[in-house]
Image: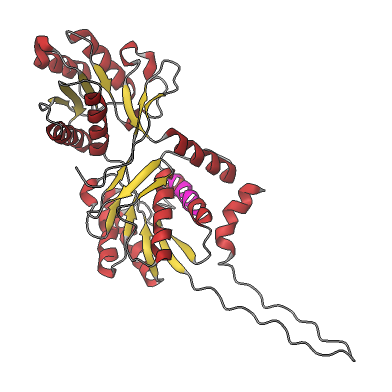
Amino acid sequence: MVAGILLLLPFAACAPQAPPRVAMPAPGYAYAPPPQVQPAIPRDRVGLLLPLSGGNRSLGEAMLNAAQLALFDQADPRVEFLPRDTGGSAGGAAEAARLALNDGVRAFVGPLTFGETAAAANPARAAGVPLLAFTNDASQAGPGVWVLGITPTEQAERMADAAAARGARRFGLLAPQNDFGRRLAAGLRSRLALIGLPPPLVVTHAPRGDVVQAAQALATEAGPEGLDAVLLGQAGERARAAAAALAAALPRPAQFLGTMLWLQDPLLGQEPALAGAWFPGPDPAARQRFESRYQDAFGEPPPRLAGVAYDAAALAARTVRDGYGTPPVGEALMGADGPIRLLPDGQARRGLAILAVDPSGEPQLVEPAPLPPTAAS
């Protein structure tokens, strides 16, 4: 019953209401006029650009659930969400944005991918309507468009800070030759330069290439001095193979570091070399609260990306409710995955916890999530 109430409440005020029926007074009684019908509350509309059909339909529906949960938590009947289907394509996202603008939306939540975001951003910017996208492609950030996905650069910076604080000075990176790997490398280089450490040794491989051979090449390049920390851009079996090969080839143990790709892989700890390896993740307490509320409302656990939809929807509702025309830039706010801060350049910075791989399959907290920085780095 609670789940049904939570799901339906945001839509209840949108349903048309029949006028009240008034009984005529009996003879001999004074006539009392019927009560006046209150005028409808003006609503501030937010467009939800979601893949409600196509290959990402189930994810889009879960994101819609998370957005409705955020609206329920806002408890403001003046805000109305208008879901619009992107179909999971760039053309569909642009058309969905135009239709929503015709319906008077004052902010956008979504869309999902970088291609959809680039397409929807054009009509949104032309109309002066802010867009809070789910993508983690930082190149989409800019005037009027905020990128809420946790970027590879952000993850690399957090890992560099954590390892350097524990004494690491020589860093290595083993990553695939793709956008993800390149952004990990850029984030690691920039952060190490900022904190006064030498640039990392970087070895990349084809996305489906031989990670063992690449690991041995990195160990050879490190030489007899070895490395203090190695960031791995792989996941699953490839991460386990890379770590085992590096552990065997390096002259001394290194602290292995990972990415958020490790979040839902309970098998990583089966590789001895990865026991105690660190990776970034959401604030455990904040994420647990969100997952518990979502489970209670909808009867199933949320997918990983549902938290981004919750955060974007909450920020958009606040944007139109407060009448600023832009999201609350500069403030540190608590989201589904922990603290988040929007920057003027369209980036969203998050406070990420540091978790450790454990043979039990349940990550262990190493460092809690700090408040995110007030400027891009």
Residue under the point 41% across and 15% down? 359
Residue 152 image position (x, y, % from top left) = 25, 37
Q: Considering only vertical position in the picture, is 122 above or below 26?
A: above
Q: Nearer the viewer, residue 6 or 91?
A: 6
**In the displayed structure, does residue 177 sit left or right of residue 262?**
left
The majority secondary structure of the magenta stretch comes to helix
Confirm whether the magenta stretch covers residue 66: yes
Q: Which residues are magenta?
A: 59-68
In the rendered image, the vertical position of residue 105 relative to residue 353, given as above or below = below
What's the image's color scheme? secondary structure
Of the pair 32 and 131, the residue shown nearer to us:
32
For the residue pair 28 and 68, the one nearer the viewer reads as 28
Q: Residue at x 40, y 18 (%)?
A: 358
Give above or below for 94 relative to 166: below
How many numbered dots are placed on residues in this image? 0
Q: Is residue 185 visible?
A: yes
Residue 312: where, in percent of width, then height?
39, 52
Query: In the figure, is residue 298 to the left or right of 244?
Result: right
For the C terminus, the quadrant is top left
Residue 55 in view, yes or no: no
Q: Is residue 24 magenta?
A: no
Q: Is residue 311 left or right of residue 74?
A: left
Indicate the position of residue 85 as horizontal and vertical percent values.
Answer: 41, 57
Q: Residue at x 29, y 21 (%)?
A: 239
Quick one: 252 or 13, which is closer to the camera?
Answer: 252
Q: Is residue 123 above or below residue 217?
A: below
Q: Which residue does the image show at 57% across and 66% down from the upper left?
A: 13
**Residue 86 horizontal/vertical position (percent):** 37, 56
